[in-house]
Amino acid sequence: MPPTIRQEQPKDIQAVYQINKQAFEQEAEANLVDALRHSDTFIPELSLVAELDNQLVGHILFTKIKIVNGDSAIESLALAPMAVSADFQKQGIGGQLIREGLKRAEELGFGSVIVLGHEHYYPKFGFEPASKWEIKAPFEVPDEVFMALELIPNALEDVNGTVQYPKEFNEV
Ligand SMILES: CC(C)(COP(=O)(O)OP(=O)(O)OC[C@H]1O[C@@H](n2cnc3c(N)ncnc32)[C@H](O)[C@@H]1OP(=O)(O)O)[C@@H](O)C(=O)NCCC(=O)NCCS
């Protein structure tokens, strides 16, 4: 049975911490999620959990970022982090979290999403190298792992610049 994908509730916070800690085998991403919840870049509607038989098995977060070019900046979203509990990986739950997150982000009116991740995984959901739009990461990263997706057609057409992540990411 597919999991239910729903918005995270306050009662889920501890389970979300454990999912991130277990999936990443360290606490940095779990702590990042906790820190981002207190940031003005946090969008409650885009912190989603996957629930199976009353158990949380996955989490995905999209936060506000800026793509900055000189004095101008446009708002976008970062998909990060996402995690599925080890026992439930490779069953499509990550994909369901991504698809539902992208759908909700589009409904909220966001134009684009940026992700730093596996070059064979995210293209399945429509992500392409961000270099296509001359969008750069704020750090050295191989071209193919830094990707972008337009939620609104041509949202990135005249956009180029460097992604500015919330400061909480600097501590990871
Ligand atoms: C990355 C992560 C969230 C993916 O979650 P997931 O639920 O395993 O994702 P999916 O099941 O959608 O897809 C994973 C793979 O399984 C495959 N898959 C999907 N459904 C499957 C199924 N029913 N049976 C077998 N394989 C399946 C997918 O094709 C995909 O293959 P790929 O790696 O070759 O692209 C999870 O592996 C994880 O938590 N990793 C540790 C944390 C991490 O690295 N997070 C990402 C960086 S922020």
Image (cartoon, rainbow, N blue to C red):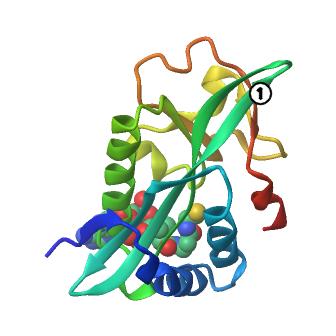
Q: Is residue 76 above or below residue 154?
A: below
Q: Position of residue 102 (x, y in %)?
A: 38, 45
In percent of the image, x 56 and y 14: which residue is there?
Answer: 157
Question: Please, what secondary structure does the residue beneath circle 1 have?
Answer: strand
Q: Is residue 46 left or right of residue 39?
A: left
Residue assigned mark 1: 68
In percent of the image, x 47 and y 33: which residue is there?
Answer: 110
Q: In terms of image quadrants, where is residue 23?
A: bottom right
Q: Is residue 63 above or below residue 171?
A: above
Q: Where is residue 163 in the image (x, y as percent from the top left)?
A: 73, 37
Q: In this view, does 65 lie to the left or right of 170?
A: left
Q: In this view, does 18 lie to the left or right of 167?
A: left
Crowd rating for badge 1 (residues with CA inside 10 Å; few <14, some 14–19, many 20+): some
Q: Is residue 74 left or right of residue 22?
A: right
Image quadrant containing the C terminus: bottom right
Which three-letter amino acid code belongs to the residue tagged 1?
Val
Q: Where is residue 128 in the image (x, y as percent from the top left)?
A: 52, 34
